[in-house]
Amino acid sequence: MTTTSTGTAGDAPAEDAPLLDIADLSVSFGRTRSGGAHRVLAGADLAVRAGEIVGIIGETGSGKTTLARATVGLVRADTGRIAFAGRDLTRLRPRELRACRRAGELQYMFQDPLRSQDPDLTVRRIVAEPLAAVRALGRQERAARADEALALVGLEPELFGDRTPGQISGGQRQRVSLARAVVTRPRLLFTDEPVSALDASHRNLVLNLLDRLRRELGLAVVVISHDLGSLAGIADRVAVLYRGRLVEQGPVGEVLERPRHPYTALLTASAPSVRRTHRLLPADLRAPTDREPWPDDVGCVFAPRCRFATPECRTEPSAGPVPDPTEGRAPAHRVACHHAATWRERIPQPAGTAS
Ligand SMILES: Nc1ncnc2c1ncn2[C@@H]1O[C@H](COP(=O)(O)OP(=O)(O)OP(=O)(O)O)[C@@H](O)[C@H]1O
Ligand code: SF4
Ligand SMILES: [Mg+2]
C-alpha cells in the first residue's frame, strides 16, 4: 500500500477550529529490557488549519513517522486526542473508523515508496486503489481520476500508467505515491519525506504542486522532511521533534531563522540554505548516546546533549512546547526550554571578538 486514508465526511467543525487538532498524543512500542514499554512519542500537541502547510523536522528516529502513523490510525496511541474535522478519531469504533478511511479525507503518503507499492500492480491501479471504496465511481471513472492525479504530479498517464513500480525510477515512484495520496481529493495530507529521492527540478515540481493544492483546493499538508531549505520555501509553520518530544513550534521564518530551542538552533546550523542568526555550530551537538533519556525520564529530554544545561534542566521536565513566557496568552511560537530567553547569551565568543 502506498497511502492510507481516514476521513470524517459530514462533520462540521466549529468555525475557526483547526482541521486537525492533536492533543497530548503518546505512543509506545514493545518492551524494554526492564519490562516497560518503549515510549517514542510523548505528549505531542499539534494543530493544522485548512489550507496550511506545516513542516515537521527532527533527526532520524525522533518520532516523525510515528506521529504521522498514529494520526492516521496505523499505530495505536497510548493516550491523547486526535480531532479531525471536529471528531475525535481515537474514540471511533472500528466500523466508524473504517467508514472514515473510505471517505479518504485524511491521507498519508508513506516514507518509502518502493516498499509500500505492490510490485505486481500497474501504476494506474496503484494510484486508483484508494478510490475502490468510493462506490459512486465506476471502473472507468476511477481510471480517469488516477490519470488525472498522475498528470497532476507530472507523470504522463499514457507513458507511465501501464508500468509496474519496478519499471520506473525512485523519484517517479515517489510521485506515484503523491498521486495516490491526492486521488481522493483529501482535506489533509501527511507526506513523509516527499522530496528526499528527487533531484532539484522534480523537488520543485512536487513542492509547487503541494503549494498549488493548498491555494486552489484549501488542502492542508503536513510535510515531514530533513530538507529544511525546502520547508523554508513552502511551510507556514514548523514543529521540531526531539526524541519523541515536540520541543519547538511556530511560524517557519521564526523557528528556522530565530530558533529559541538550542536543538532547533543546531539543526538549522547544519542546513546551509537556512539563514543563521546564532553562532552555534553543528559540532556543538554532542553525538547521541545509548544512555540518553526518552521522554519518560526526568528533566529536559535534550539535557544530555545541551551545552546550556543547568541542574534545573536535569530535574524539571520541560514538557512542551510550552508557551514562551515573553509572549502573550496564545503565543504562535512555543518552545520547551527553561532557558529559551537566555541561552544565546551563553554562546562562547569566537577568539578575538568582543560581544
Ligand atoms: N513498529 C515499531 N516497533 C518498535 N519500534 C519502532 C516502531 N516504529 C518505530 N519505532 C522506533 O520509534 C522511534 C521513532 O521512529 P520513527 O520512524 O517515528 O522516526 P523518524 O523520526 O520518522 O525517523 P527517520 O527520520 O529516520 O524516518 C525509533 O527509535 C524507531 O526505532
Ligand atoms: S531546558 Fe536546559 S537542557 Fe533543555 S534545551 Fe533548554 S537549556 Fe538545554
Ligand atoms: Mg520517518
Image (cartoon, rainbow, N blue to C red):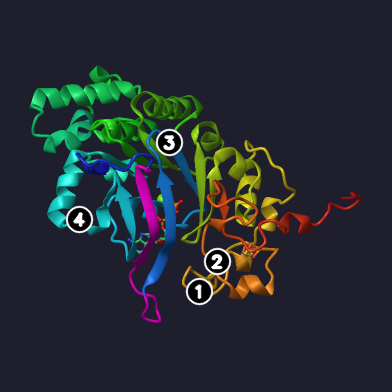
Magenta range is: 17-36
Q: Identify the residue position indicated by label 1 in the image.
A: 297
Q: Identify the residue position indicated by label 3 in the image.
A: 52
At which x and y percent is residue 162?
20, 25
Secondary element type, mark 1: loop
User: Mark 4 or mark 2: which is in front?
Assistant: 4
Question: Residue 29 versus residue 1: which sits nearer the camera?
Answer: 29
Q: Is label 2 in contact with label 1 (beta carbons under 8 Å)? A: yes
Q: Identify the residue position indicated by label 2 in the image.
A: 301
Secondary element type, mark 3: loop
Q: Furthest-bottom residue in view?
A: 34
Q: CA distance from mark 3 to mark 1?
A: 34 Å
User: What amino acid is labelled 1 in the image?
Assistant: Asp
Q: Is label 2 within 8 A of ligand 2 (CB to nearest ligand atom)? A: yes
Secondary element type, mark 2: loop
At which x and y percent is residue 274?
63, 38
User: What amino acid is labelled 2 in the image?
Assistant: Val
Question: Residue 185 versus residue 319: which sits nearer the camera?
Answer: 319
Q: CA distance from mark 4 to mark 2?
A: 32 Å
Q: Identify the residue position indicated by label 4 in the image.
A: 92
User: Mark 3 or mark 1: which is in front?
Assistant: 3
